[in-house]
């Protein structure tokens, strides 16, 4: 299973790394989870520079593509040199977004007649792009999912695991990352958030 | 406010970046939150290479020092070239740890007669180091806190904000990162986890 976590300059660390950490629980089962970027290095909204694990085109061949979020999302969606490198297919790929990543999904035409989740800052842009925004952390229709609020990344990861592995795998992954003493309730909360969409 | 997030090769991405993302909500108030490492580059347990923002000695002058977690923690604590660079003072510094970071606190003598939280994998090592391990996500005594389970990082960050900024600042930071539609309950859960320790 190839997983691409699209990550751009100005990225929100939580939005890329929570999903990466959770989905990598499947590493032993052959899942390859890669921070995917338009350049070899990218720097986060808080100044952390990381090396891309894959270049942008990797997303086009990945089984699961998750759009992270960041402070330059609007500028990046206007950069055709970057956006034209993406050629995604919701018929064959699982596609999800976190916070401002939802704006990218909208601009790529992946949310036609589909309501979506995003963060409070991005909400007006997504509405402006013609997409209904829901006051909930997670929504999916078919192979396309959106989530809002950094910590909702765990729901996006739970959904991807349920869709491409199993509910058991999702439960085990969330159990591992959940706070000690709150593991069962955290697993149930994550499953509940996505149960209507699998 | 100088914040050092100690991060070593083999680090768990969630354990360093959740705290980093939340505490950076105070960036506008002058907080400087830095990934602090023994070398200029470090690679995570899942193969993500990042650049250190500060070298290890930065922790000695920081107001808040948080130990991240990772898969090589035991080896690192046996490396005196690394550990001797740390000279922390719980009288003047706020010191916290996440998961296997708790083992480092134990080995540095910062948990004498103090019970602690850690993850389920690290638990036997911490017990072996002579520290009582609690079945809860967070515990603090004075200026030293420990937490267990990756997502408990939000509690560690909440505690640091309450101690060094205000409960209001902590509430605002958690509100920002919380899932849309679950913001109030997430804020209350975080405050509840640390309320006995501030």
Image: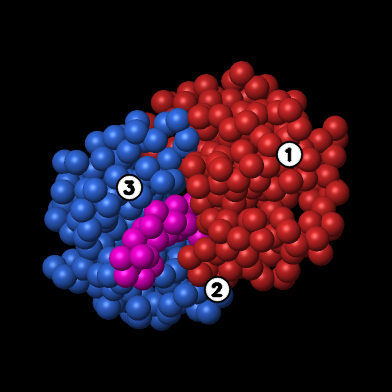
Chain colours: A blue, B red
Residue bearing mark 2: A51
Would you name the residue on which mark 1 appears?
A: B95
Pointer 2 local density, CA inside 10 Å: few below 14, some 14–19, many at least 20: some
Q: Nearer the viewer, residue B137 or A85?
A: B137
In three-dimensional space, the C-alpha distance between marks 1 and 3, rounded to whole angstroms, equals: 30 Å
Q: Position of residue A45 (x, y in %)?
A: 57, 57
Quadrant the C terminus of chain B occupies: top right
Magenta stretch: dominant SS?
helix
Q: In the rendered view, tell whether residue A99 sits above or below residue B134.
A: below
Q: Name the residue beneath numbered marker 3.
A: A172
Residue B143 visible here? yes
Query: The disc numbered 2 marks a residue on which chain?
Result: A
| Residue appearing at x 34%, y 61% in the figure | A26
**Mark 3 belongs to which subunit?**
A
Q: In the image shown, does B122 or B152 lie closer to the viewer? A: B122
Q: Distance from label 3 to label 2 (Cα)?
A: 29 Å
What is the span of residues highlighted in magenta in the rendered image?
A10-33
Determine which quarter of the picture holds residue B130.
Answer: top right
On the same chain, marks 1 and 3? The answer is no
Asked whether the residues under the numbered discs 3 and 2 touch, taking CB atoms below 8 Å apart as contact, a structural biologist would say no
Which quadrant of the figure has residue B181? Answer: top left
Identified at 56% across, 59% down, the residue is B71
């Amino acid at each position: 299973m190839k997983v691409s976590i699209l990550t751009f300059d100005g990225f929100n660390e939580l939005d890329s790394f929570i999903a990466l950490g959770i989905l990598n629980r499947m590493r032993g089962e052959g899942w390859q989870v890669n921070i995917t970027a338009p350049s070899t290095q990218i720097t986060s909204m808080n100044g952390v520079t990381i090396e891309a694990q894959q270049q942008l085109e990797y997303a086009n061949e990945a089984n699961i593509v998750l759009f992270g979020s960041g402070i330059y999302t609007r500028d990046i969606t206007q950069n055709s040199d970057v956006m034209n490198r993406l050629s995604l297919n919701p018929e064959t790929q699982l596609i999800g977004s976190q916070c401002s990543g939802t704006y990218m999904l909208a601009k790529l035409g992946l949310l036609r007649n589909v309501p979506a989740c995003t963060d409070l800052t991005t909400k007006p842009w997504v509405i402006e792009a013609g997409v209904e925004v829901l006051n909930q952390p997670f929504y999916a229709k078919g192979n396309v999912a959106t989530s809002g609020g950094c910590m909702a990344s765990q729901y996006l990861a739970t959904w991807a695991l349920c869709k491409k592995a199993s509910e058991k795998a999702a439960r085990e992954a969330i159990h591992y990352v959940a706070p000690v003493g709150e593991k069962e309730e955290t697993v149930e909360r994550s499953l509940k958030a996505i149960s209507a969409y699998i």
